Image (cartoon, coloured by chain):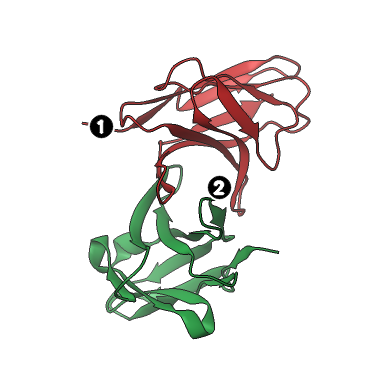
Chain colours: A red, B green
């Protein structure tokens, strides 16, 4: 079945450590996205990529970094510069014509 | 500014009752519109979408939505809710043709009373 996988489901890290969240899709979509979701809030866009080897900052990119070396993969690194990294992180990919986005199951990151 | 607004943060309805969740957008032309549902701790699932044509669109799980240009609205409806419909619902839109980003509303949390 085609879809988006995110791993791990839950992630715990100590303050000051960098951590990388995985996102893989086999939908053959060109575009991929990372969102952050805090309790009781909507989705905020961190980074997005329309094509391999290219990506753009979203609304809250500070303290995060990404890479897009393969069409299928769009990993997100939460760096020690991110002041409040504890959140639920969602990855998505889309059909470019209408930007219909398909979401992964999410990763809950807790920084201790 | 381009925005999507969901006026109701939290709605409670009784099982079997009808449901309407509101969504308004601010933009001049006709946007692409979506409704997503999110169960706790899960990703978002697409319920339905509107690109053009018939303004009443049918989705999964018995949901429908109506696009009203005059009111800049895309309200989600269901005739009779089930306990399993309890979740967070997000309205989203592509507000500019060719835009690379979806604009999301803040979400409406739906609680079902038995």
Counting from the top left corner in percent of width and height, residue B81 is at: 30, 72
Residue found at the far left of this picture = A1
Which of the numbered marks, if any, corresponds to residue B101?
A: 2
Cα–Cα span, label 2 and label 1: 23 Å
Secondary structure at badge 2 equals: loop
Counting from the top left corner in percent of width and height, residue B96 is at: 56, 58
Q: Quadrant of residue A38?
A: top right
Q: Residue at x 74, y 27 (%)?
A: A63
Q: Residue at x 69, y 17 (%)?
A: A14
Counting from the top left corner in percent of width and height, residue B19 is at: 37, 77
Position of A65 compared to B76: left or right? right
Secondary structure at badge 1 equals: loop
Q: Nearer the viewer, residue A89 or A112?
A: A89
Q: Choose mark 2 or mark 1, whichever is in front.
A: 2
Q: Quadrant of the N terminus of chain B?
A: bottom right
Give the labeled residue for mark 1. A2
Q: Nearer the viewer, residue B98 or B75?
A: B98
Q: Residue at x 71, y 39 (%)?
A: A60
Q: Quadrant of the C terminus of chain B?
A: bottom left
Which of the numbered marks, if any, corresponds to residue A99?
A: none
Kindly indicate whether the residues beneath marks 2 and 1 are on one polypeptide chain. no
Query: Badge 2, how many Cα within 10 Å: few under 14, some, many 20+?
Result: some
Q: Nearer the viewer, residue B36 or A27?
A: A27
Compared to residue A58, the image places residue A72 above or below, namely above
Compared to residue B92, the image places residue B39 above or below, namely above
Counting from the top left corner in percent of width and height, residue A85 is at: 69, 31
Q: Quadrant of residue A2?
A: top left
Chain of the residue on which disc 1 is drawn: A
């Amino acid at each position: 079945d085609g879809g988006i996988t995110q791993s791990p489901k839950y992630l715990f890290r100590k303050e000051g450590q960098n951590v990388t969240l995985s996102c893989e899709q086999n939908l053959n979509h060109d575009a991929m996205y990372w969102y952050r979701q805090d309790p009781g809030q909507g989705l905020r866009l961190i980074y997005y990529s329309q094509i391999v080897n290219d990506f753009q900052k979203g609304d809250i990119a500070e303290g995060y970094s990404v890479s897009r070396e393969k069409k299928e993969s769009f990993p997100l690194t939460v760096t020690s510069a991110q002041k409040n990294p504890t959140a639920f992180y969602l990855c998505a990919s889309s059909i470019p014509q209408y930007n219909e986005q398909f979401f992964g199951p999410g990763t809950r990151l807790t920084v201790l | 500014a381009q925005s999507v607004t969901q006026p109701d943060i939290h709605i409670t309805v009784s099982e079997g009752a009808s449901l309407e969740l509101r969504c308004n957008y601010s933009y001049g032309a006709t946007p692409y519109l979506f409704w997503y549902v999110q169960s706790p701790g899960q990703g978002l699932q697409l319920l339905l979408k509107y690109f053009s044509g018939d303004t009443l669109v049918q989705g999964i799980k018995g949901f429908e939505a109506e696009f009203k240009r005059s009111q800049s609205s895309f309200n989600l409806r269901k005739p009779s809710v089930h306990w399993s419909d309890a979740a967070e619902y997000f309205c989203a839109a592509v507000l500019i043709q060719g835009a690379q980003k979806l604009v999301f509303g803040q979400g409406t949390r739906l609680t079902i009373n038995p």
